[in-house]
Image: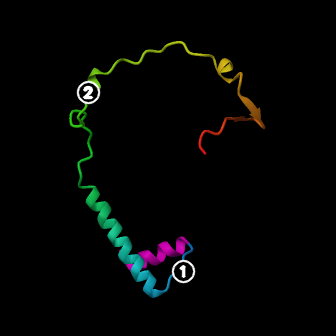
Amino acid sequence: MELKTIQHLCELSKLNYDDEALEKVASEMTDIISLMDGIKEFDLSYDDTKDNNSISFGEVREDIVKPSFSPEKLMQNAKSVDDCYVVPKVVD
């Protein structure tokens, strides 16, 4: 990556580097861009037959809409504080 481009990005980001640090950042950015270019070469298309799954997408059940609880019924026991719902802490 060109040093001029790095200087421009640093200016936009309000970062101040000396010449030695700019060279290091330019080298690191070049490495990152090379890595991203390498990743683009991988085939990331999904094939549901290759994930050791015995069910393909064509065999899954159809989504069927079923009646559910009304929002009023679900929220009747929820505590509201300042228009926010308070829930119990579940993680210590």
Q: Quadrant of the C terminus?
A: top right
Residue 83 lies left or right of residue 21; in this view the side is right
Query: What residue is drawn where x is 78% and y is 38%?
Result: 82
Determine if the magenta segment contains residue 11.
yes
Query: What residue is drawn where x is 77% and y is 36%?
Result: 81
User: Quick one: which residue is furthest to the front in this view?
Assistant: 92
Q: Residue 76 appears at what percent x and percent y?
A: 71, 21
Query: Disc 1 on helix, strand or loop?
Result: loop
User: Quick one: which residue is furthest to the bottom in this view?
Assistant: 19
Looking at the image, tell me whether mark 2 or mark 1 is earlier in sequence order. 1
Query: What residue is drawn where x is 34% and y is 18%?
Result: 61
Q: Amino acid at mark 2?
A: Ser
Query: Disc 2 on helix, strand or loop?
Result: loop
Which numbered disc covers residue 33? none
Q: Which residues are magenta?
A: 1-13
Q: Amino acid at mark 1?
A: Asn
Residue 63 lies left or right of residue 81; in this view the side is left
Q: Quadrant of residue 73?
A: top right
Q: Residue 87 appears at what percent x and percent y?
A: 67, 35
Residue at image mark 1 = 16
Q: Residue 34 appears at what percent x and percent y?
A: 29, 66
Magenta stretch, overall SS: helix
Query: What residue is drawn where x is 21% and y is 37%?
Result: 50
Instruction: Count neighbours of disc 1 (C-alpha within 10 A) and say few if under 14, some if 14 to 19, many if 20 or more.
Output: few
Please, is residue 77 above or below residue 25 in the view?
above
Camera-nearest residue between 92 and 61: 92
Please, is residue 79 above or below residue 72 in the view?
below
Please, is residue 89 above or below residue 17 in the view?
above
User: Quick one: which residue is furthest to the left in this view?
Assistant: 50
Residue 56 lies left or right of residue 9; in this view the side is left
> Alpha carbon of mark 2 to alpha carbon of mark 1: how far?
54 Å
Residue at image mark 2 = 56
